[in-house]
Amino acid sequence: MVRKRNAMKSTIFKTTVREIRESLGRYMAILAIVALGVGFFTGLKVTKPAMLKAGGEYLEENNLYDLRLLSTVGFDESDVKQLNEREGVEIAEGAVYVDFLAQDEEGTESVLRAHSLLWVQNHVVVRAGRMPTAPDECVVDSLVFTRKDIGTTIRVSDNNEEDTRDMFSGTEYKIVGICDAPFYINYERGSTALGNGKLKGYVYIPEAGFDTEAYTEVFVRLEEKYPLYSQEYKDYIDEVMDWAEPLCEEVAQARYVRLKEDAQWQIADGERELDKRVAEAEDKLEDARQELLDGEQEIEDARKEIADGWKEIADGKAEIADKRQELADSLTELQDGKQEIEDGLDQLEEKRIEASDMEEGDEKDGYETGLNLAEAQVKGKKAQVESGLAQANMGSRQLEAAENTIARQEEKLRDAQKKLEDSEKELADGWEEYEENRQKLADETADARKELEDARKELADLKEPDTYVLGRDKNIGYASFESDSDIVEGIANVFPIFFFLVAALVCITTMTRMVEEQRTQIGILKALGYSEGTIMGKYLFYSGSAAMLGCGIGFLLGSYIFPTVIWTAYRIMYRLGDFHVILDWKLGVISLVVSILCSMGTTIATCRYELTSVAAELMRPKAPKSGKRIILERIPFLWNHMKFLLKVSARNIFRYKQRFYMMVFGIGGCTALLLTGFGVKDSISSITYNQFDEIQINDMSVIFSDPYKSMDSSEFEAVMADNARSYTLAFEESGDLTLGDKTKSLTLVAPEKTEDIGLYLNLHTTRDEPVAYPGKGEVVLTEKLADKCNAKIGDMVTIQDDDMNELELKVSGISENYVYNYAYISPDTWKEQTGKEPEYKSAYVNVREGADVHEVSAAIMNCDGVASVTVNDDMKVRFSSMMKSLDYVVLLIIGCAGSLAFIVLYNLTNINITERLREIATIKVLGFYRRETASYVFRENLVLTGIGAGVGLIMGYYLHRFVMYNIDIDMIAFDVHIAPRSVLLSIVLTFIFAGIVDWVMNKKLDAINMAESMKSVE
């Protein structure tokens, strides 16, 4: 008995395997549809956990901060030490960042943000090159720089302000690597007050590469760890904020006091030091002045002495000239006397000759005596003359000696004169230097006193510090990554359900047809003694094995393909770590259970009726259904004008109700999925245009550090006068709206001039009906805020701000809005219910026509008192880029919907042809050509495809709205609509898939043997 039972089971198993082999197309349809549904379900479901795991591992490996502390007075080492001593803090590190104009080696300028490298937190990931080791080295943004830039230098441009240049220890930094940073996980780099107002990228420099005594920010890592974006982590951060914000204020206040005391001491010490140095310098100047006066006296004495010397020389020269004249006259006289003597001697000689001729005697003696006496007298005179000549020669030599002496004295006087001139020049230079030093002292003293005065003014202007404690959620990349992953999760919660419904439909259709085809075989098996359970097991094995195989294949492939494709798409926007496949076995079990229910459950429902019949009834052919007229036959005008083959096709379409509904709903489901995929894209992609071109129509928003009316707004107003077409002040405050048990966060807005708000804000309903600005005691809520709180026009709502001010307001209107939640009130409402004037710390600005909005933004950022500027164009780009990444997700959905459509159409068409083998063989015997046979069969498919597409549009409309309702992102609303282009594409794609299926199945028509028509049961 046992052996017989085993043999029976073996036979059933063999026939089941043979059935699978012979109807492999049908079997593979079930397998494929289940694999697609499971793959879609598990793939989308694990995508967010896989994304968060990859992102979480990347951020944890590189120790992304938990808190970022900012203060307008900065931080020092003692502040960081105090933060590290706080319980719950794992590590606190001071950091420096500064925006600067950078020049590359070609001289091109761009705005970069320089960060200091930290030891523990915010580790950069080097993609090429190495980490910097010297103060003049850096790693740069991989989104902006390439490997080719390694080895080049970045120069701190001279166009930077002095304060910016002073932040750096050098002027040039060598690029040694390109990197990614956990602080910048997406493409967004932020805004700046420099250049055109947009940051191009970032650089990381060792701390020694900066020259500053204070940190500009402090990063904090907390001890407790929670999964990325988990509610536990958000709650933990909320708890931490309760002590972190007061602690940051305490630290900043202590530094403020230290800075003030240090400044006061430095000013006082500077004044003392200045007075001391001025006194010393004045003493030195007085000594120098006295030396110069003494020098002037010495020069005057020297000048007088030289003048006296020249006078003496002149007198000496005059005296020598007189002596020479006297000597010359004496010489003339002596020469004349000498000549006379010579002449006298010659005369005496002649007379002696005459005397010799005289006779001796007294006359001769007396004559000779007279001659001798005369000769003696002449010789005496000659001696006197010669003595006078000798004395004259001696006098001449004396005069020459005197002249030489005078010449030497002249040379000395000339030397003295030159020295005097040099001394006079030195004295003039000394006076000039004295005057320069005196002026320099006066200038330096004035500068020093001005610096002291500026220091006093700066000290007087030193305000109580503003502090900011920012969590990760204030990091643009971190927040955007969460929003993007939430959208994927929203889609994953809805779409797979529809896939499983279509899979169940395919299984029902397939198994129903299979059981009906094998009625006779079931009857024989029952007649042979097989139990209903054994027979049922055959079909359960058929559908169950296909479902389980499909589930396994879909689970493995879906867990890999879908997250990988979506992650690859998001990698265009995000710089995160490597992706790891997650196999969620819990999802696998759920998928298996659902797959078995869709396949085996439908199989049980299908077989149950047949198995309750007796064997004899099953072995007889099923009685054909009685003929009925279709609805077209009741319209003679149409029916009588139709061709015969069209009438046959019409009867085949509408007479077989089960096939009709299966085809219509199967094809309709595929069209609905396609329409929903395109609709999701339409609804998401339009919100940036709607928000920033139709609602918030201002060009930019400005946030001030202090209330506008209490700050010096002259610089801002000057920029507005030069660049703005119009601007208005606004009061903005964070708060919570409460209605019943519903509470929702919002931004409360009250413009200074409500009559001008239309220039900056277009309040209207989703039907483009204008919404009047609320009056006193009224409020206009944005649509999603009102929807989440179930608020309607006329309801009374309570709004409470962060300072616990409560407003009781009547809802006067609900306006269209897509980004963030807003509540609009009038200034009178705020003043009436709080008793205080609104503090306007925001401004909405419209720039002049043709002005560069980013250049205007940079000019505004440079104004005193401006905290931040948000350019609406940048917001559009940011949201558009975030939503654009969803295009890949939508394309994936559309691709899966197309695959599903192909499988459904293939399966239903295959069943249709299989059911009508004898009919098709008969018309081939009757002489139908190949094209006519295909037209006869596929005409019905095309008509059913058209009907199914029409039904699918209706189903898709509601499915799309259901999907968009489940894609719920906090503070973002979607413009739920389907563009006409999407409707057309969905219909066209459905017909394209139908055409492809018809082309594939045409080969099966060709393979039908005409002899089949002879096998019809009588």
Image (cartoon, rainbow, N blue to C red):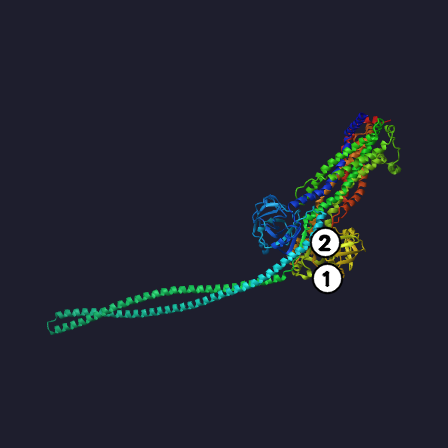
Residue 341 placed where, x, y %?
A: 21, 70
Circle 1: element type? loop
Q: Earlier in the sequence, mark 1 or mark 2?
A: 2
How busy is the neighbourhood of tag 1: few (under 14 within 10 Å), some, or many (20 plus)? few
Residue named by callout 2: 697
Circle 2: element type? loop
Residue 869 seen in the current view: no
Instruction: For marks 1 and 2, give the CA distance.
Output: 27 Å
Circle 1/circle 2 CB separation < 8 Å: no
Q: Dividing the picture into quarters, in which one does residue 803 lie?
A: bottom right
Residue 745 placed where, x, y %?
A: 74, 53
Query: 619 or 442, which lies in front?
Result: 619
Figure check: 992 above or below 864: above
Query: 713 or 785, which lies in front?
Result: 785
**Is residue 462 rendered to the left or right of residue 594?**
left
Figure check: 307 above or below 233: below
Q: Dividing the picture into quarters, in which one does residue 194 lie?
A: bottom right
Q: Amino acid at mark 1?
A: Glu
Residue named by callout 1: 837
Residue 622 placed where, x, y %?
A: 86, 30
**Is residue 418 rendered to the left or right of residue 602?**
left
Q: Dividing the picture into quarters, in which one does residue 665 lie?
A: top right
Q: Amino acid at mark 2?
A: Ile
